[in-house]
Image (spheres, rainbow, N blue to C red):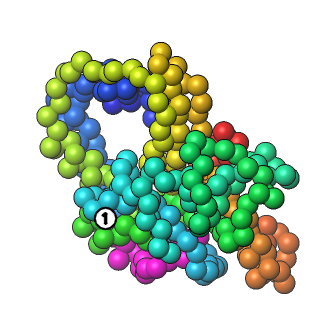
Amino acid sequence: MVGGGRALHPIGTVVGGFTRIPSAGELRAARDALVRIKPDALETLEMVADFEDLGFGSEREFVAVRNEGNYAINSGRVVSNQGLNISEDDYYEHFREYQLPYANAKQTQRISGEPALGSPTAIGPRELRRGSHPLMVGALARVNLNYDQLLPEARKAAEEAGLKLPDYNPFHNNLAQAIEIVHGIEDCIRMIESLDPKEEEPSVRIRAGEGGAVTEAPRGLLHHFYSINRRGIVEKANIVTPTAHNFMSIERDLRGIAQSISDRPTKEIRRWCEMLVRAYDPCFSCSVH
């Protein structure tokens, strides 16, 4: 309805506004549909909470966007459970993305004490400084870092599901996703009830410049950077996806699982490794963006 009829890659949003504003009747229908599916979301959360897992997990750095006004999605500071607290403008001082020599995917690490690069630059593994380490983004990171910002119904459902924080078990990313669905439904209902949409003509002034931003995609932290000339043409763009942020943690956890259950049959080890990858919910097309 808002995205132009698409759930992914929406065409209804444009710089400065939207191509079409939903009618009051459409908004009421959307609110009623959200109310109807809320029990399904709570039932799904109960089901996911019963998923079998290995009780696997070691302390890790969670990274997510946070602001003090609400459960952060589109704006805020980039924070972590290990002391990171930066603005989106400082992203390249703390994160590096590089091409893996053995795969088409890219990997992102957090690096402390690096000088700012300005615009993004791809670097190779040999150029990485010591002290770099993997990080985890996504629903589990957001719930760990922003639990106090969840709406009351989502917090209650999380408690009833047995969530204990901090939770370092990567298999519980699915549980965190289910918690966020409950929160998202309630948040959308509140949003619709408070909306007073009006048709406005977008006002945009084109000028040369460059800049980046961060947002929380469903799979986790997403950074995007653009350089635009005075005609409004994008001359340079860089996108660092959630999958790139998570790649090193996925590999580390796969090694950890394989080692911890190495005495079990190969078929069982493979099953647990596949379950771990699905819990991280990687996007393979995003990994090679």
Q: Is residue 287 left or right of residue 112?
A: right
Q: Is residue 252 magenta?
A: no
Question: Measured along the vertical axis of the image, is residue 180 above or below residue 106?
Answer: below
Query: Would you identify the image quadrant in which residue 130 lies?
Result: bottom right
Question: Measured along the vertical axis of the image, is residue 203 above or below residue 136?
Answer: above
Q: Is residue 160 magenta?
A: yes
Location of the N terminus (image quadrant): top left
Q: Residue at x 73, y 60 (%)?
A: 128
Query: Would you identify the image quadrant in which residue 259 lies?
Result: bottom right
Q: Secondary structure at mark 1?
A: loop
Location of the C terminus (image quadrant): top right
Residue type at the position of mark 1: Leu
Q: Residue at x 50, y 64 (%)?
A: 63
Q: Residue at x 79, y 45 (%)?
A: 104
- Looking at the image, which is closer to me, 269 or 221? 221
Can residue 195 be seen at all in this image of the molecule? Answer: yes
Which residue does the numbered mark 1 point to in the structure image?
A: 150
Image: magenta residue range? 157-172
Q: Position of residue 4 (x, y in %)?
A: 39, 25
Q: Residue at x 43, y 65 (%)?
A: 85
- Looking at the image, which is closer to me, 63 or 270? 63
Q: Position of residue 163 (x, y in %)?
A: 42, 77
- Looking at the image, which is closer to me, 117 or 169? 117
Q: Position of residue 134 (x, y in %)?
A: 65, 67
Can residue 178 be seen at all in this image of the molecule? Answer: no
Q: Is residue 120 left or right of residue 72?
A: right
Q: Position of residue 272 (x, y in %)?
A: 71, 70
- Looking at the image, which is closer to me, 71 or 257? 71
Query: Would you identify the image quadrant in which residue 122 lies?
Result: top right
